[in-house]
Image (spheres, rainbow, N blue to C red):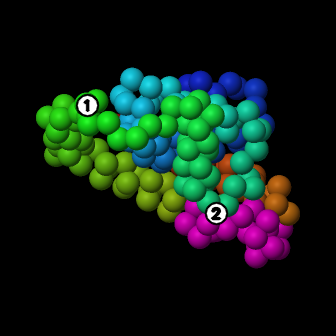
Amino acid sequence: MATAPGIPARMPPGLGAELHSWMVLYGPALRSYFRKKVGLGEAEDLVQQVFLNLQDRGHVDDIEHVNRYLFRAAANLLTRRGQTKTWDWSDTVGVEELELFDELSPERALIAKQDLARLMEALGHLPPRVEEAFVLHRFEDMTYREIAQRMGIKPKSVEALIMRALERIATVVEKPR
């Protein structure tokens, strides 16, 4: 499976798939967060920096609450860069410039509905143990260690099951429309 843009092929097994899924899930919210703090110009660069820093960390299996972790990393990045600022109304963007209507278009709603259907289809075709490990990790916020104890296997086996799930889901979800 090809890695996401900006993620080198030589990284710990499964890390690229995990980061890619997090970029898809949390990238838009991080972009919005940064846009409010530093403006449109730097938001995308800062989102990429958060994920590059996470990639440099080398492992993600011990992160229990991904959302909290990513937003704490984002806040820390802003603090380190010294770019946090108080609200300045002079650089706000008008509603008409936000392109909200494009984001809420019937076409985008249909695409989102199709993507969700593909995801559900992919989940439905996973082997039972792979699905169990994936659901416990993604939807029950359990750590690899907790899942391993519950399933009676080693944490490395849990990691392998989740990576298998991510690869299969990515294959189904990324098929051309």
Left or right of 111, for residue 153: right
Q: Secondary structure at mark 2?
A: helix
Q: Residues within 10 Å of mark 2 (few under 14, many from 20)?
A: many
Q: Quadrant of the C terminus?
A: top left
> Observer-nearest residue: 32 or 27?
32
Indicate whether 82 appears above or below 24: above
Q: CA distance from mark 2 to mark 1?
A: 43 Å
Indicate whether 122 appears above or below 59: below
N-terminal-most mark, 2 or 1: 1
Q: Quadrant of the N terminus?
A: top right
**Percent coordinates x, y for residue 26 in the rendering:** 49, 47
Q: Which residue is mark 1?
A: 90
Q: Is residue 13 magenta?
A: no
Q: Is residue 142 visible?
A: yes
At x 44%, y 37%, the residue is: 85
At x 49%, y 54%, the residue is: 122
Left or right of 125, for residue 161: right
Left or right of 56, for residue 152: right
Identity, as a three-letter code, of the amino acid under mark 2: His
On residue 137, the disc is 2
The quarter holding residue 93 reads top left
Q: Nearer the viewer, mark 2 or mark 1?
A: 1
Q: Please, what is the dominant secondary structure of the magenta stretch?
A: helix
At x 67%, y 34%, the residue is: 53
Q: Which residues are magenta?
A: 132-153
Identity, as a three-letter code, of the amino acid under mark 1: Ser
Q: Residues within 10 Å of mark 1 (few under 14, many from 20)?
A: few
Q: Secondary structure at mark 1?
A: helix
